Amino acid sequence: MTAEEMKAAGESSAQSAPLPLEGVDISPKQDEGVLKVVKREGTGTESPMIGDKVTVHYTGWLLDGTKFDSSLDHKDKFSFYLGKGEVIKAWDIAVATMKIGEVCHITCKPEYAYGSSGNPPKIPPSATLVFEVELFDFKGEDLTEDEDGGIIRRIRSRGEGHSKPNDGAIVEVALEGHHKGRIFDQRELSFEIGDGENYDVPPGLEKAIQRMEKGEKSIVYLKPSYGFGSSGKEKFQIPQDAELQYEVTLKSFEKAKESWEMNAEEKLEQSAIVKERGTVYFKEGKYKQALLQYKKIVSWLEYEMGFSEEEGHRTQARALRLASHLNLAMCHLKLHSFSAAVESCNKALELDNNNEKGLFRRGEAYLAVNDFELARDDFQKVLKLYPSNKAARTQLTVCQQRIREQHAREKKLYANMFQRLAEKENKPGPEPAGGDCQADTEMKDDQQNGVDGSKSQVEAEA
């Protein structure tokens, strides 16, 4: 009997007889804490996994047949994230065994329901409960910031603890990549988070690994922009714009030290190492990886309070921050992220307002988005401070030419606009329509009554 049929069978809060204790024991401990009876088989082969968003209808009864709640009464289906503790234990256990369209009865002992406290006033203490549940839908967890469905994770088995890899963590994983039913990548590897592209690990998978716990096994679905993108991956015979599926196990990881865990010397030492790594990436044309390295330095050295002026730490930190902002600007220019390039230049110029590279790169970013006047101002300032900068002189010439072209276009546009307006004003108006009876009548009345008025005046009024 479906949930709808049960509702139609009777709306009273009590049934004619107590409900029986029956079903297959599906409790993890096999202690008969959760019994399940399938009333209608579902379709397909897949069941919900940990973290999936599931949608159900349900009705709940006490053992004496008293109904205490039903989503049907609320006239809306009920959704929750499986295995996250949002519902009673019995539901997390039972719904994970269901298939789409399945209807089942679940009998759950108090320790898998509301325990010795119950849930007053409807559920008394230490109550065994019976539920009818119908599963309508389930879908994996969206891990993208914009929730665009680009990275979907489904957890096969939960990991241990609550700690997860951070930026710079060393992770050891076992992965298996699938494309259209073909396994294209199967291996175990260790790499540093942020360096996955060098190991042919797509960015979406790297993001998913950062959300995993040690020992966790998950399935990750990637849209093209989070996989190998428009370029594909020749090494794995992956075409452009391909959707991918990975099965991944996070075997172990070692977290990188957070900023607050490092002293001043450690921060400076690590920043110098990371800066060199970023430079290598940049020279290899791996601008996204270089970007991540320079961002680390900025996050470590953002606040100067922990650096001693006496030991020269503050000056060293300031120089590294300045270089990182300038390098970030260059990476953003290469990636055509021009507004981000301007922002990085602004931060560099806060540290050194006459910095040659900061002014020049900001000018290049402005020029790229056709802000010719702002670009011209930056290039002029570069030449004022550094007259021998040939690149700035060349770009200034480009700006001035673009400004002249822009003014010429605007002049022509306005000239054409004014010409059209003038032509419109000089164009004779349409003859009065034959239906303008009121104006004709008023004119005749005026003539009959001896009222003076020229034809032109009457036409104007009409």
Image (cartoon, rainbow, N blue to C red):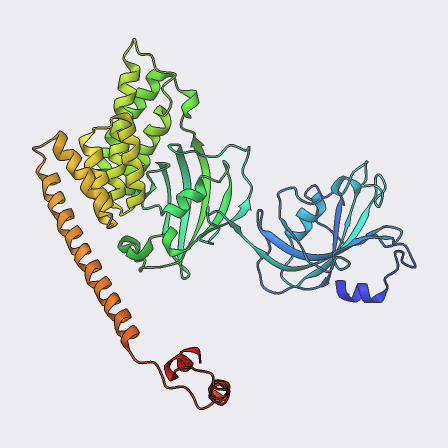
Image quarter in which the C terminus is found: bottom left
Displayed quadrant of residue 88:
top right
Residue at figure coordinates x 30%, y 36% from the top left: 344
Q: Position of residue 314 (x, y in %)?
A: 30, 16
Residue 210 higher or lower than 446, as above or below: above
Residue at figure coordinates x 48%, y 34% from the top left: 164
Q: Position of residue 310 (x, y in %)?
A: 30, 8
Q: Nearer the viewer, residue 377 or 116?
A: 377
Residue 284 seen? no
Q: Position of residue 299 (x, y in %)?
A: 37, 29
Residue 353 higher or lower than 304, as above or below: below
Image quarter in which the N terminus is found: bottom right
Residue at figure coordinates x 38%, y 22% from the top left: 303
> Outermost residue, top direction?
310
Q: Nearer the viewer, residue 376 or 195?
A: 376
Q: Position of residue 227 (x, y in %)?
A: 37, 52
Residue 363 is left or right of residue 243, and the answer is: left
Residue 300 higher or lower than 123, as above or below: above
> Outermost residue, right direction?
16
Q: Nearer the viewer, residue 436 or 188?
A: 436
Q: Nearer the viewer, residue 222 or 252?
A: 222
Residue at figure coordinates x 36%, y 83% from the top left: 430
Residue 298 higher or lower than 432, as above or below: above
Displayed quadrant of residue 208:
top left
Q: How many marks?
A: 0
Residue 371 is left or right of residue 206, and the answer is: left
Residue 70 seen? yes
